[in-house]
Amino acid sequence: MSDPRARIGNTGTGFSYEEPLVFELSRPGRIGYSLPAYDVPPVDAVQMLPDGSVRDDIEGMPEVSEVDVVRHFTRMSTWNASVDLGLYPLGSCTMKYNPKINERAARLGGFADAHPLQPASEQQGFLELCHRLENELAEICGMDRVTLQPAAGAQGELAGIMMIRAYHEHRGELRSKILVPDSAHGTNPASAALNGYEVVAIPSDEDGILHPEAIEAVMSEDVAGLMITNPSTLGLFEEHVVRICEIVHAKGGLVYGDGANLNALLGIARPGDLGIDVMHINLHKTFSTPHGGGGPGSGPVGVKNVLAPYLPTPVVRELAGAEGAGFVLDYDLPQSIGRLHANFGNAGMFVRAHAYIRSLGPDGLKRCAEMAVLNANYLLARLRTAYHVPFDRAVMHECVLTDRSLQDTGVTTLDVAKRLIDYGYHPPTIYFPLIVHGAIMIEPTESESLDGLDRFADAMLAIAQEAREDADTVRTAPHHTRRSRLDETRAARKPILRWQPAARD
Amino acid sequence: MRYIPHTENEIQRMLDAVGLSQLDELFDAIPQKQRLARPLDLRRAVSEQELWGELKTLAARNASTETHDCFLGAGVYPHFTPAVVDALTSRSEFTTAYTPYQPEISQGTLQTIFEWQTMICGLTGCDVANASMYDGASASAEAALMAMRATRRSKVVVAAGLHPHYRDVLRTYLNGLRAEIVEAPLADDGRTAPLAEQVDGATACVILQQPNFLGAIEDVRAAAEAASACGAKLAVTVTEALSLALLTPPGELGADIVCGEAQSFGVPMSLGGPHLGFMATRQKLLRQLPGRLVGETVDTEGRRGYVLTLATREQHIRREKATSNICTNQGLCLLMATIYLCLHGRRGLRALAELNLAKAEYAKARVRENPALSLPLEAPTFNEFVVGVPDVAAALERARADRLLGGLDLAPYAPDLGPALLVCTTELVSREAIDRLVAALAGDAS
């Protein structure tokens, strides 16, 4: 029986809508805007501006009504998985619940509709919020100072590496290398390289963690610093971190902490107490600001006092004594690495992160770490019989499994991930960290309940069983999505990166 | 805690399942003396109601377009945003998703990015655009890095009309690399002086802002010719993206890279961020482009769909050999801008740009006829221009008393101009507000 929608020229099934590109919805003459009437004399741009400086038409811009736009994006939204829809166990991304009050607060006119260049006297509420958030993050991380400026974790890494460079240069030392474990996020070596450093990869040991000997073997006076992620991307606490920091410090180097996995440590341990000199914090991971389909992130950086002179400018400063009360943006930091952002960072995210910290308080933050770690260990306990565990130790906030136990079935990590979609779950991070063959990296976060975890574990176990009984179903998954597997090779071979009228047959 | 679902009973059952007796043991891998032996020194948690009160109090201590008429621009522009933008952007299917690594369940995000890439190409006159950068400043710095890779040269010529904060960010990004930055000065009319002197065979690129920081509309074609005569690239940075709806697209005038800030397209000013860097280029520079890209493909049934593509340029594959360290884009801001662009469409965007131009021309006419004020630069402008005033501090104070955010003091940025303000007039300011601003700046009794 044919689909009734097809009979009227519609695609999709029932209330599952196919949605064309907005350009294909365009009808000449339709409008989706309304502008205020002119209260000033109109001008003729072509006449007023120099010859050739005024454009003709804007190629490809759609002509659609407001209703068209609302339906277009509403329909497209139904094609997305999201945290609000269900468990989203993307390892290393900390896909926790994003509180609604934070969104509402960030939309307050005094935050959302305020200009960054309005005088300090006209943005005291914002500057005070920045000051509070800096202090909160410094306390949580055990750091002396915090800059909120970096726009994302990777820009925070860049800022941190630049401060390390500035520190050495002010000592007259031109060190050329940065040590990066092979389990690190790709941003780590990329950030070091972007700042002109040679990257030396440090192999992880058989037990998955870094050992002092491996650092000792390569640490020299030509090494500016070490980048370390703790807990590591394997979800393991780097048990030798204190000793490792001592080794780096003894040769005059500094230690950078990748704070992507800070969620596991909230109120439990502080990177600054372990010997880390500088670290970034992903507000969009640990502090619940929404991931937004890929961003915006926000990557504040905490430093020990030795690096404070090099913080990016401007910094928020509380006035004291004869200066009066209040806060200013201070540019007077002569040894600063300079500016990283057009303004003062992703301010809207500061509002959300501060709201989150205030909602949880010290006890609630610690509870997050405990429940995130409990959830990861619980999933590991339930899944270890069916999936290979490459490093068999107690984990922190995430666990890494592999597809090795399914090898004889022909089912791979990718297949497991795609089959999870049929069970209604966003897949974990896969094939990362790169050092684990066929990695399946699961980070449930503290937002998930026991029954929710059990259902997810049941799905993972069911897939392992399907791999043995009906591998083909797994290997061709997903089967219950509006798109089946997409041809990524074709996309890369002859890239089509925009819609063009000519392509419309 | 309402964000954490676990009951005490469930916690106990889960501990049993992992073979532990208390929560503390979860952290046995962390030696006791490395643990924090006290509670975090933070204020105790507050209820949602108390939190809302606290944040409202903080917000109320900031001026905003709700309380003031805003004549500040300089890279961040006060524009009206239709209600549809926030209503759709608030859909948590968009807000609470992440990078579309799994295309089968991320087509909403992917198709939005594809539409964005298409519209940015149309607006800039370029062949390809990426899925956004952090902001206009980092996009400009990445443009310089991209040109350095493409030309294997290390000298960057920066027009003095590039936003001073962008110039700062560029310096920060290039520090540590063996790069030379040379500044190309402005002529008396506010436009960049002819570039022949600075550009040579060692030059990787010229970075030119259009309209420039002082509002002047630059001669992009002349800059493109000067650059290409030496084999250098021209990167054009646009901070007021609405100008792209009116001015000839830089890509058509010879720019190799067009980048900048798209906050004007429905993204809140939000005290400076998050905003929306954009980046577009010619087809032949595609492999040098930083950031994410979405491409069209088909699924196993031959149905059209979209995926992240050409990832071999990126850090998660290439690590230290990647084109950039960028990982996140500005996805949610990109969504805002894409919705905004769809609403305004082919005709609305142009009409809005013309309204902005008309407001500025009206304001300039009022300034011109006021004996206390001057227009020190003669170059044509879009919606932003320089006003000479007798005394900046007094002028801004009078404006403030009349609830006007009266423009940016140029003293730290362009001291040669003497006492002057950079004034921006968008569709948000009425004729009446402009009249009040002119009176306040001039010190006219009202």
Image (cartoon, grey):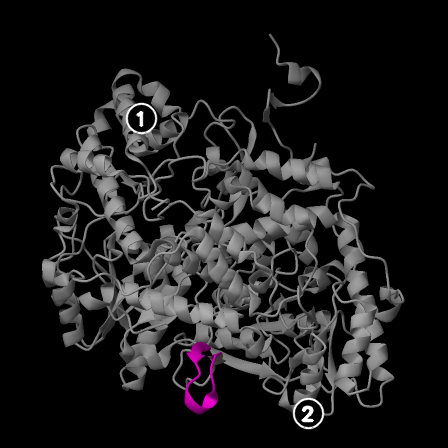
Asked if one can make out residue B189 in the rendered structure from this viewpoint, the answer is no
Q: Is residue A417 left or right of residue B256?
A: left
Nearer-the-camera pick, B116 or B257: B116
Q: Is residue A167 left or right of residue A7?
A: left
* Quadrant of the image occupied by residue B362: bottom right
Residue A221 image offset from top left, x and y in percent: 19, 77
At x 38%, y 32%, the residue is A425
Q: Is residue A89 left or right of residue B12?
A: right
Q: What amino acid is labelled 1 in the image?
A: Ala
Q: Is residue A462 above or below residue A358?
A: above
* Quadrant of the image occupied by residue A20: top right
At x 55%, y 57%, the residue is B285
Number of residue marks: 2
- The residue stretch that appears in magenta: A314-327
Q: What amino acid is labelled 2 in the image?
A: Gly
Q: Is residue A138 left or right of residue B235?
A: left
Nearer-the-camera pick, A102 or A490: A102
Residue B260 image offset from top left, x and y in percent: 60, 64
Residue A87 image offset from top left, x and y in percent: 37, 36
The residue indicated by pointer 1 is A459
Image quadrant containing the C terminus of chain A: top right
The residue indicated by pointer 2 is B418
Element carrying mark 2: loop
Q: Is residue B36 magenta?
A: no
What numbered label is drawn on residue B398? Answer: none
Q: Residues within 10 Å of mark 1 (few under 14, many from 20)?
A: some
At x 30%, y 80%, the residue is A167
| Distance from the alpha carbon under mark 1 to that under mark 2 | 70 Å
Residue B230 image offset from top left, x and y in percent: 60, 74
* Quadrant of the image occupied by residue A436: top left
CB within 8 Å, label 1 to label 2? no
Pinpoint the chain carrying mark 1: A
